[in-house]
Image (cartoon, coloured by chain):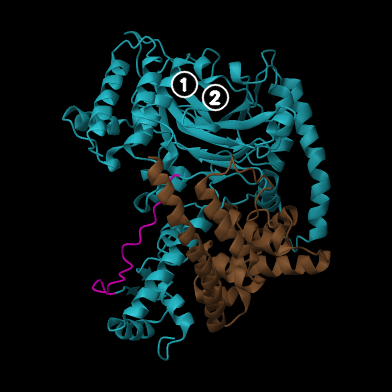
Amino acid sequence: MGTDQNKSKQDWILKTLDCYEGRLVQYAFRIVGDIELAQDVVQETFLQLWKEKRAKIESYLEQWLYTVCRNKAFDLKKKEKRMFSLQSDIDFADDGDNSPTADIERQEDAVGILDVINSLPSNQKEVICLKFQDGLSYKEISKVTGLSVSNVGFLMHKGVKSMRALLKKQDNKGIAERGVRCLAR
Amino acid sequence: MFGKMKESKLTAYVLNELSRRERRKLEKSAQNDSALINELETLNKVCRKVHAEMQEVPLPALSDFRRNIIKNRLILEPIKEGYSLKYLLEWKVLAPALCASVLALVVVFKTPVGTVFFDNTNEPERFATEREAYTPVEQYLVRDGGNSVLPGVGSKYLMDKMVPDYPMQRTKGNYVGNSLLNGNLNVDSRRLNRFSSMKLTNNGVVGKVSPSMPYNLDNYDIIFKNRTRKIKGNASYVVPVNLETGSYDKVMKSLNSNRIPPKDNVKIEEMVNYFDYDYPSSNDGAPFSVVTEISKSPWNDNHKLLHIGLKGKDIMGEIGLARELVAKDVKIKLEFNPRKIKAYRLIGYESRRSANDNSYHSCEMFANELMSGHMTTVLYELIPVAHAEKQLSGKLMTLKFGYKLPNKDQWRILLYPVLEKYSDFDMTSDNFRFSTAVAAFGMLLKNSDYSRNLSFDDVIKIAKGAKGKDLNGDRNDFVRLVETASALNGKGYR
């Protein structure tokens, strides 16, 4: 492999890293439950990417990255035999400071939805996150997770339904609160 | 519930995951079924909301050291078989040793004024080993930053930051990478189009919901409201440097003809940057000076306001002060300390996050040129961690400036630690209070939720007390403008 070729592959890898780094670390984190390990997984994924032929995987790069990342994450989890709780997900959970003064309304909403996502069964949570956060299609999610497309659709729907129930509850509450605020003005 | 239709198909429809045939079928049966239409509308609303929320979650990043492993180890041996975890663990052990050796070199070259200056290109032999191990990152400059910076922090601070950074070229997963990704869509447009009704399918066919449908999804434009974001982990965010001021002219024009300006014309960042501020000139070789100030937010007692002022170095030309390029590709990045700052909100820049301008997230947009004497002002609203007072004092955040000198292609980095040092609002500089007044005015015009505890009279009061020298009378005009707005507001023009 010539140096030029090497350089262009390096550029490609770095650009890909720039694009996917955050999303993949978060994805791995949801599986392994530890930020250091999640970073290990993503690092490994990209070292693996070096070994692949660019022309071969470029057409489904995103799917490739998520699949490899997922497999490596589950391998590592098995190896580490670490028990992890999805509830300890630092990205979704509140950071422990629940003081009402520091909170603002929008955040309360955010915590609500993310809390619901957090409380979903892990397979629902995974497809929801891959769809709404990472923007994968049903087909891509099916390839990454090994679930059938219709199964992905089913899990997605169940997840969306749970969130719908929450939003309905919030709406009812919200209308009352907004009323109070209007009076205050 | 809806005939033979599986409920999960409805969700799939809203997420644009149905085949063309299935979609048509569903649309047909929806035409005479208001219950189904309602259901779809509700699902659409829920999905949009969930999507919006999830896009707000800040993404974690790979450490710079790991990036360097990915980048550089493989330059040396790109085709080598297998990088096992064990191998990587060895790397973890090696890392501190490498850091320490680089640090030792830095201490040796520390100049007496607390300035450390790395220049790989001029020191080829000396830094040869580091260049092999790290990215060829160029130059490091770590400086004391005046009032807001811990005196003499330079070398000590550098210890934390020793691993050369991949400076400012990173965004958190939002890079726009046209050519390198599959298909015709780049990442950003794809993210934005995720739930819109238009979507390029694998074979390039554009699927589209009929516009005549009552639940037309075409209008789904993702509006990135400039919301408060929570800080998670070691947060870092890129700050845009805005150099346009056109919005203030528009606001002035409207108010001068006794109209409240349309909200879309109110761009807070442009209004704030319309004014000149009394920032000191750089006098130590850097192409620009930086001032930071933190105080209580006038519209929320529990929040703080951070003011960052940037000024290009004055260059004395033959005819007085000439406008010359002093730095290019200027990028500001903030790294918040999550133990001190719970959440932040960049004030203004809402419109730059709209669907039409997805370059907001791309670093490329920040290819900003800084001219001599030019000023840029950025305001942040911060929510401190509630119990932070009890903790030891420390860094609130680090400002990182990446830039290049006009004729160079090397990145230079300036690091400014910002200490937890709040001033009383009344004791802040005119710069701080005036920029706050302008921002607050913009928020009031936009009818922002964040400005609820503030009135035009408050703004007038703050601005009047912060006119400073006001050489060209701009600040005085501003006060008049707010008075006009206040009067119009009183007449119920809003």
- Point out which mark residue B295 bears: 2
Q: Residue at x 33, y 26 (%)?
A: B274
Q: Residue at x 56, y 68 (%)?
A: A128
**Cβ–Cβ below 8 Å for labels 1 and 2?**
yes
Q: Which residues are magenta?
A: B210-226
Residue B95 relative to residue B360: left or right: right
Residue B314 position (above or below residue B389) = above
Work out which residue is located at the far bottom of the displayed protein and give it.
B4
Q: Secondary structure at mark 1?
A: helix
Residue A172 position (above or below residue B228) = below
Report if residue B233 lies within the magenta region. no
| Quarter occupied by residue A2 | bottom right
Q: Amino acid at mark 1?
A: Phe
For label 2, the crowd category at 10 Å Cα-Cα, with few meaning under 14, some 14 to 19 and many 20 or more, is: many
Of pointers 1 and 2, the one earlier in the residue sequence: 2
- Point out which mark residue B265 bears: none
Residue B404 relative to residue B321: left or right: right
Q: Is residue B476 visible?
A: yes
- Point out which mark residue B432 bears: 1
Chain B colour in the picture: cyan
Chain A colour in the picture: brown
Along the line of sight, the residue nearer the viewer: B269 or B304: B304
Q: Amino acid at mark 2?
A: Ser
Q: Nearer the viewer, mark 1 or mark 2?
A: 2
Q: CA distance from mark 1 to mark 2?
A: 9 Å
Q: Position of residue B14 (x, y in %)?
A: 41, 73
Work out which residue is located at the far left of the displayed protein and give it.
B257
For the C terminus of chain B, the quadrant is top left
Q: Residue at x 39, y 52 (%)?
A: B223
Residue B189 position (above or below residue B384) = below
Subunit of label 2 = B
- Label 1 and label 2 in one chain: yes
